[in-house]
């Protein structure tokens, strides 16, 4: 399910009144994301092409002058969090609220926040599905607390909250698209120079939540990032974007091969979208190649993701791939208009035959970035 801005704001206000008392100053929201193509490229100064989801996180905020922070969430009933702004410091010991308090800490460090606040959250972005519920939360908060700041200040503040406070070594793709997306467009991001291009994208995607929960603060994601850094170091370059020779080590070579080939696929996908009539079979072939590379060269897929992708392809999808950091989460499928029901049924049946828990499905269209009420 997705909520309208009005519905999401109403829900967040109700949580605020019930749990914190009174009314907030306002409600701000930001979306989750689906990455069309360009995975594990952001922290390698590469290219990515995400869209914002219609699923959003809503943050009802009220500032307070005593430096106290109170946080409640409809998704975490009975787990209120309290802290003092002046006492926040990494690493986080606050569990789920580390993403919230990390943004407060990061904004304070950047000179953008000096007051405490009361915060009530509600969200229709699935948690643990690889759809960047964390960035949606961070960006909704950042806009609510420091929306006067330019996005090129808010984006690194949110990334720092996730990297330094929470300890999740992610790149900047999620926060960039959550803040900067435009409805009906994919956002081409070049992480080497920070340039952005809005490219029309009107196709509807089938999103398959495998229900295999992932956690980007675990060791595997950090290991892949370290392997990429090591491959670049051995080649004498700053990042894999500049790599011209493949490392001799077979694991590092595979990681570098994925990054290089994925950047090329992003460029091809974007070029196809810019054309007068984008060919869905060509876009699907690029999605397929991306998943195969993530599975074989980068080794970040898992059984649930592979079952979802294989079943979607067999059911007639133009292409399918995992999306997000991997090790669980969601896959996307590009399908013929009107054919999503057939693909859903085949994927669900494939999960049943494999003895896996039932996946859930949603459709995604390119939506807008962070909005104020």
Image: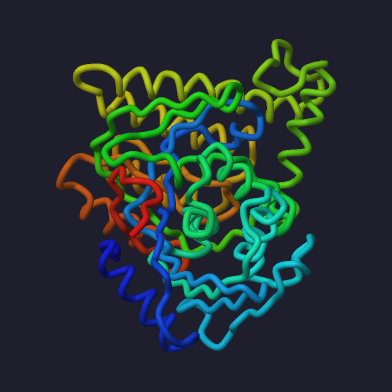
Residue 198 sits in which quadrant? top left
Using the image, determine if residue 111 lies above or below residue 60: above
The reply, left or right, for residue 296 in relation to residue 34 is: right
The residue under the point 44% across, 28% down is 188
Using the image, determine if residue 191 lies above or below residue 275: below
How did the renderer colour the structure? rainbow
Q: Position of residue 324 (x, y in %)?
A: 52, 46
Q: Position of residue 216 (x, y in %)?
A: 65, 54
Count of marks overlaid on the render? 0
Q: Position of residue 35 (x, y in %)?
A: 45, 41
Q: Residue furthest top?
A: 244
Q: Residue furthest front?
A: 65
The reply, left or right, for residue 295 in relation to residue 338 is: right
Using the image, determine if residue 275 lies above or below residue 370: above
Residue 2 in sight in this render: yes
Residue 352 in sight in this render: no
Q: Nearer the viewer, residue 261 or 83?
A: 83
Q: Quadrant of the C terminus?
A: bottom left
The reply, left or right, for residue 301 in relation to residue 306 is: right
Q: Nearer the viewer, residue 214 or 109?
A: 109
The residue under the point 53% across, 70% down is 63
Q: Nearer the viewer, residue 270 or 143?
A: 143
Q: Quadrant of the N terminus?
A: bottom left
The residue under the point 51% across, 19% down is 264
Q: Position of residue 306 (x, y in %)?
A: 49, 48
The residue under the point 49% across, 37% down is 291
């Amino acid at each position: 399910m997705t909520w309208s801005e009005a519905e999401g704001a109403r829900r967040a206000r109700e949580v605020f009144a019930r749990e914190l008392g009174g009314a907030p100053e306002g409600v701000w929201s930001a979306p989750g994301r689906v990455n069309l193509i360009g995975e594990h490229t952001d922290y390698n100064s590469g290219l990515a092409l995400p869209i914002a989801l219609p699923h959003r996180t809503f943050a009802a905020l009220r500032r307070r002058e005593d430096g106290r922070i109170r946080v409640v969430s409809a998704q975490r009933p009975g787990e209120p969090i309290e802290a003092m702004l002046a006492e926040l410091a990494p690493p986080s010991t606050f569990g789920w609220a580390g993403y919230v308090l990390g943004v407060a800490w990061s904004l304070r460090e950047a000179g953008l926040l000096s007051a405490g606040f009361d915060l009530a959250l509600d969200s229709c972005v699935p948690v643990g599905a690889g759809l960047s519920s964390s960035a949606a939360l961070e960006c909704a908060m950042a806009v609510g607390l420091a929306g006067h700041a330019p996005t090129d200040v808010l984006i690194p503040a949110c990334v720092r909250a996730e990297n330094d406070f929470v300890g999740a070594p992610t790149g900047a793709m999620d926060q960039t698209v959550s803040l900067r997306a435009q409805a009906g467009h994919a956002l081409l991001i070049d992480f080497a120079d920070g340039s952005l291009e809005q490219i029309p994208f009107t196709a509807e995607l089938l999103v398959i939540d495998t229900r295999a929960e992932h956690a980007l603060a675990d060791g595997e994601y950090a290991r892949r990032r370290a392997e990429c850094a090591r491959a670049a170091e051995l080649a004498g370059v700053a990042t894999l974007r500049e790599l011209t020779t493949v490392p001799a080590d077979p694991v590092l070579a595979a990681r570098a091969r994925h990054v290089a080939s994925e950047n090329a696929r992003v460029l091809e996908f974007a070029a196809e979208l810019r054309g007068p009539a984008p060919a869905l079979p060509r876009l699907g072939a690029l999605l397929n190649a991306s998943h195969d590379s993530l599975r074989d060269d980068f080794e970040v897929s898992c059984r649930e993701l592979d079952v979802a992708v294989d079943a979607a392809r067999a059911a007639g999808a133009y292409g399918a791939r995992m999306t997000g950091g991997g090790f669980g989460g969601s896959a996307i499928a590009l399908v013929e208009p009107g054919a999503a029901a057939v693909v859903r049924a085949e994927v669900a049946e494939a999960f049943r035959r494999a003895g896996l828990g039932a996946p859930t499905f949603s459709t995604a269209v390119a939506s807008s970035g962070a909005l104020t009420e």
